[in-house]
Amino acid sequence: MTAHILVVDDSASMRQMVAFTLTGAGFTVTEAEDGVIALDKARGAKFNAVVTDVNMPNMDGIALIRHLRALPDYRFTPMLMLTTEAGTDKKAEGKAAGATGWLVKPFNPDQLVATVKKVLG
Amino acid sequence: MSNDLRRFHATFFEESREGLEAMETGLLDLESGRGTADTINMVFRAAHSIKGGSATFGFTKVAELTHVLETLLDELRSDKRPLTSDAMDAMLASVDVLRGLLKAAEAGVPPADDGAALVAQLNAVLSGKTTIAFAAAPAAARPKAPERFVIAFAPKASMFMSGNDPLRILRELAELGTMTVECDLAGLPAFADLDPTQSFLKWTLTLPGTVSEAAIRDAFSWVEDECDLSINGDGGAAAPAPEPVAAVPMPPAATPVAAVPGGGGASEDASIRVQASKVDLLINLVGELVITQAMLKAVGGSVEGAVAERLLAGLETLERNTRDLQEAVISVRMLPVDAVFKRFPRLVRDLAGRLGKQVNLKTFGESTELDKGLIEKISDPMVHLVRNAIDHGLETTEDRIRAGKDPIGTITLAASHQGGNILIEVSDDGKGLNRERILAKAREKGIAVGDNPTDAEVWNLIFAPGFSTAAAVTDLSGRGVGMDVVRRNIQSLGGETVLQSTTGKGTKVTIKLPLTLAILDGMTVGVGEEVYVLPLGHIIESMKPSAENVRTVSGEGRVLKVRGEYLPMVHLGSHFGMGGQERPPITVIVEGDGQKLALEVDELIGQQQVVVKSLETNYRRIDGISGATILGDGRVALILDVPGLIRGRHVVKAA
Amino acid sequence: MNSNRNDVAHEFLAFKLGQEEYGVDILSVQEIRGYDTVTRVPEAPDYIKGVINLRGVIVPVVDLRLKFKLGTATYDEFTVMIVLNLKGKVIGAVVDGVSDVVQVDGEQIRPTPEFGGIIDTRFISGIATVGERMLILLDIESLILSADITGTAPAIA
């Protein structure tokens, strides 16, 4: 059974690239453009991991993670943030919201796959 | 691996273009005071997105420039810096340079301006502030590599809550080298009291000293706050010196936001991106359907009997359905003319600034739609007209005040639908055209003018090649691009240009374009053995002229008197070498570019919608013919280019 | 065009113009049709008969007998039109009749001799000898791209 990943990013090009990379590595991917849509999809299906961008309109990645953690199905699901700054603010905020970890952009696709594989155990 | 990323470039370029537009609009709004609290944030987000995407996809120059731009925007939005005009200029200039860089990157060619100068300019604006500190911590004294590392790892009870698993971390560490593990079970409660979602175990691990300490720390990077951790080198220096803090240099990728100003990225209106070629194919297929339906209609006319009624009723429904489908498909390619209008606020601002004039831009009918292909082509002529209006039409502020006018001049862009056409007007409230100067210039250039030309005829002289009454050809609008080029451009799109002016009050140029070039309402006429199609939009009327209204003017051929006007007659049969009757019984009065002709044809066959087919794909352009179509019986009929015919006659006249 | 001479064998469609046999690269032949009604176009030389509707596309028709001034151009039930397609540009060529497809090796092709101005050698890429037959090979590209058909001068001579 392949792992099902939820990829959230309001940039179509980034989202498609991440989805393409993960699909190529054998994962099943569902895409969402922002936190609201992602939350909706998460309620409808069970994802094994969530990869989300931070800066998004309507609901940003950190709020998304916070909301997801409140759902019983997602209490322990690995959730990765895609952050830009190497600075600590966003990461700390993310961790406080319940993020598992992060990937700093730009990352190369291999890194992404390795990290996702790592968190899925 | 980078090859795989290329497929996403197209989307990135598209997004970035939209983002830059949003940025430009936002910046202009901020400058004119129309911005809201969110405007600067929106501009920041747009820059941030482009920075991210460009870094991810490896467009370093774009990333570098957007990084500095973003820094400036960040300061502005957090009120660390006031919005000054040199900041605004630098930011607007960045938008231009970024457009150029993206365009070059998309084409795979080196850019004209690599942005380095602008980065320096932005930095100059930023300098004096110490907000950005690139603190490169001094390289710590390198400790001697220890014999081994001893790691004490005690996850806090909540580690699982973030989706992290100690087991996963241990596995990761094990990959670094030979690891020994000792587990401390002391914290484990009785099984009955055990909450499996909490962590109670602790570990002591060792790894060889040859392992990079950074790699060990990396494994714990996500969970630093969720565990008690100590990493000690054993048999070597004590606590390892802290890693040098890497200076935050150039841009790591950010999230490219699909910049939709103001609104949400999750747009409410469901829209999809479609390749233009797919839409073209759809239009072609519908065109074929129209032809087939017309053929069936023709055949249906000769069917008899009881079945005939049902068949004809069905064919009528088919015709309605086809027409509806056709309109729907054509509208797919239609976009609001705002796509063209929106580049003008920036243009007007820059031009007005450069010329030291005060200009206000008004737009009307931005939502009026026209074919996508036309939008791209109409931009240049309009830019030229607006440049002309600002440069030559509008007076300087002092002159305007002296003339009792509002010191701020107004340029108006207005679009509307009229029949099967779209009208676009470019007008100004400047000094208007000077009739005498134009006549004088025309005489100077040897252009023939009648004795008492109407104002319309005088204004039309401006469209003559090489005509320019500007005393000095300014850098902006004069460079060899005259009104004649504008008119020719519009003509090549199947449209017309009309100029109106009132001295002292202003000038208005009206561009008329057909809504679609693919399908035409036409009147089929017979000339000899051939069938020709006259575009209905150019037909005024058809008649059977009486002999007394036909005169012969020496040197000009025959003319027809219609309501006081004398219109030149064109015998289509001999014009095209197709034969036909010597004195065709029917005359069709047509109009183009404001002038009329009387076309002589042998018979009026009918009226129908025709699908325009290209003659030039496999053959060549023929003067006076704008294309071809396939009739219901499968025959090819040529479509007349009325404005072309009219122009052709005028060339003959002037020679 | 002539670079193919030393290559692998090429197939040519053989057709007749007057008394002579001509050949055209089979790869450029889209289809063969009868000669039907043609819509005349203004400002065309006599050898461009007009345009036809070929499944929705407007295609010009060139009568090769008139263009090369060979024999008499008659239009009867045997008149044939070869539809040529080169890189998407389509024209119809009217000929006296189509024979067969001939395989020609590179060595069988000889350069065009001077015909003393009888035939316009611009459009001829070589002469092929196959057994008893002599095929005059047509240079499709120069024909399709010639000024009277495109309205512009050809890019390559």
Image (cartoon, rainbow, N blue to C red):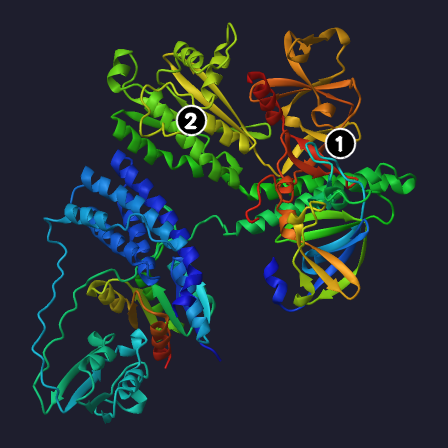
State the residue at coordinates (29%, 28%): B352
According to the image, label 1 marks what residue? B531
State the residue at coordinates (78%, 66%): C131
Of marks 1 and 2, the one in the foreground: 2
Q: Which mark is residue B386?
A: none
Q: Chain of mark 2?
A: B
Q: What amino acid does circle 1 point to?
A: Val
Secondary structure of the residue carrying tag 2 is loop
Q: Is residue B20 above or below residue A61?
A: above
C8 or A102: nearer the viewer? C8
- Taking C114 as reference, is B74 left or right? left
Q: Is residue B255 visible?
A: no
Q: Is residue C28 above or below residue C69?
A: below
State the residue at coordinates (86%, 50%): C78
List x then y, in percent, for residue C144: 65, 47
Q: What amino acid does circle 2 point to?
A: Gly
- Taking B64 as reference, is B594 left or right? right
Q: What distance separates the C-alpha of mark 1 from that of mark 2?
A: 38 Å
B36 or B605: nearer the viewer? B605
Q: Is residue B273 visible?
A: yes
Disc 2 residue crowd, few under 14, some 14–19, many 20+, Cα 10 Å: many
State the residue at coordinates (87%, 47%): C77
According to the image, label 2 marks what residue? B482
Can you tell which quarter of the image residue B544 is in? top right
List x then y, in percent, for residue B121: 19, 46
Q: Chain of mark 1?
A: B
Secondary structure of the residue carrying tag 1 is strand
Mark 1 vs mark 2: tell me if same chain.
yes
Q: Is residue B394 above or below residue B347?
A: above
Give the mark nearest the N terminus, 1 or 2. Answer: 2
Q: Is residue C56 above or below residue B247?
A: above
List x then y, in percent, for residue B206: 20, 91
